[in-house]
Image: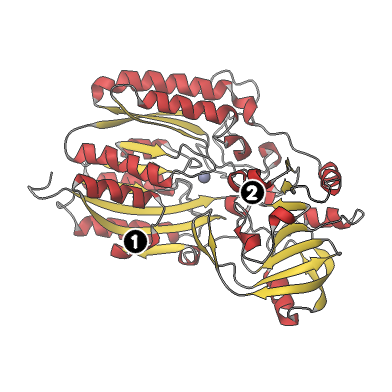
Amino acid sequence: MAGTTRPRVLVAGMQYELNSFVAGTAGLERFRQFRLAEGEDVWSIARGEEVAGARDVAQACGIDLVPAILGFGGAGPILEDGVYEFFRDRILAALEAESGRIDGIYLPLHGAMATVGTPDAEGDLIGRIRARVGPRLPIVASFDMHANFTAAMARGLDAAVGFKTCPHVDYIETGRHAMEILAGAVTGRTRPCLVHRKIRMMTPPEGHDTTTGPMREVVARLRAIETLPGILAATVIAPQAWMDVPELGWSVIVVADGASALDLASAEADRLGLFCWSQRERYLVQRTALDEALAIAAANPPGNPPVVMTDAADAPSAGSYGDSAVVLAALLARPPMRGPVLMTMTDPEAARACAAAGAGGRLRIRVGGAFQPRFFAPVDVEVRVRAVLRESYESCLPPGRIDPGLRAVVEIGGFILMVIAERQMATLDLRPFESSGLDPRAAQAVLVKSAGQFRGFYTAIAARILELDTPGPVDGVLTRLPFRNLTRPLWPFDAGLETPW
Ligand SMILES: [Zn+2]
């Protein structure tokens, strides 16, 4: 400890999820659009997040937190050079200012940030922090389940913990867990050491649902490992699948208390890694052909709950823009349904044209492929504008306020109700529809653009869930995408692999 006073812990986080296949680049404005704060302002943007859980534990343990910076930029295309450096320079400056006065560092990270010049931004940051503070100061980080945990991160950290839920609902618990480990380390009660195993496999996130299937078993094993004496944490990281970066692959992380528990931690990490590997085929999902799905939706009788269809390949929560009109085109190519069929579309030009026409206006617009014409062809449609909205809305998932810009609710073909927004909205909860005056529960069918996280809210209202086989930058059939930078061999890209490491 730096003195006889209360321990002090620096807190700094940057959270972003790269999708290499999404068109364009993103800058710091993305973080300003979502959440970005420095110093004490960090607390005001950290409600419901890891930092909030960490703060509870720190207060209970008599630890003073020194917030440096926290930024959340959602998921999207590769970041411009300078974005990571913005965070890095502020964090290193805060370290400099607190030199000799801090007892530990907590980094609430997502673990999937990359810029054009720095494919492993968090690994680079952790390495620089470690070089600055030396080998003894404890550094603990928390990660999203969809991070890509790298050797550089493992080298620089004393401990790492990740989410155990997908859909993610354990932000607070994960922050608490990280700070509990750090509190033990800064008070000298424990000596965390991290064991990392990289598994040469990648899976689409539809299979990461922890409420069912193999991931549920994985989490049960994690909890069992965490009850073992000398083990402080166990985590499985299943990266988001669309990062075209070296070292992509699943990770097992087990944190031991002291060198005496390292053998146990290593043995458990090996066992867990082999289990994940043995289950790999089970993470693949069965997709439904679009025509077949629409026929099922059309047959959904009045009064029945909606058929929920997922166009995961265009999921904004995984970085896409939500500008696919693939399902819209297929709907218009077949006989009209009873309806309503609800869907969302990101298209700034169309949203503005509809807003200019105003409620009740009729016009012809072109939607689809506004951002990613490489993946999505546009569709010309006659619309009747039902409503125009300019307000942001309160979102349940991700938690917090979402500002989609201008929104127009339009009717198409007498049975489609589409929310056209200037900026993308994740359809993980019902709020994008409800806040637009639409009731998903009363629809014949609802199209969501999510790769799995929507289940937390939509399973309860769905007569049936159909995962569509559609193209896009978030394609769950990974071998269809043009990866170039992966460290090979890697399942399922390479056949015939016999071991996970
Ligand atoms: Zn995630």
Residue occupied by mark 1? 42
**Residue 319: image x %, image y %?**
59, 53
Q: Which picture quadrant has residue 336?
A: bottom right
Would you place residue 372 above or below residue 222 in this image? below
Q: Residue at x 56, y 45 (%)?
A: 243
The crowding category of the residue bearing disc 2, from other C-alpha atoms within 10 Å (few below 14, some 14 to 19, many at least 20), is many
Q: Amino acid at mark 1?
A: Val
Report whether 106 appears left or right of 142: left
396 vs 149, nearest the viewer: 396
> Residue 140, percent across and down?
31, 41
- For the point 87% across and 58% down, the residue is 332
Residue visible at 72% across and 81% down? 356
Residue 154: % across, % down: 36, 36
Judge by depth and name the residue closer to the eye, 304 or 272.
Answer: 304
Report whether residue 313 is seen. Answer: yes
Looking at the picture, which amino acid does disc 2 mark? Ser
> Which element type, helix, strand or loop, lies under badge 2?
loop
SS assignment at label 1: helix
Q: What is the quadrant of the N terminus in the image?
A: top left
**Vertical arrangement, residue 482 with respect to residue 67, above or below:** above
Which residue is under mark 2?
450
Please say if 235 is above or below 472: above
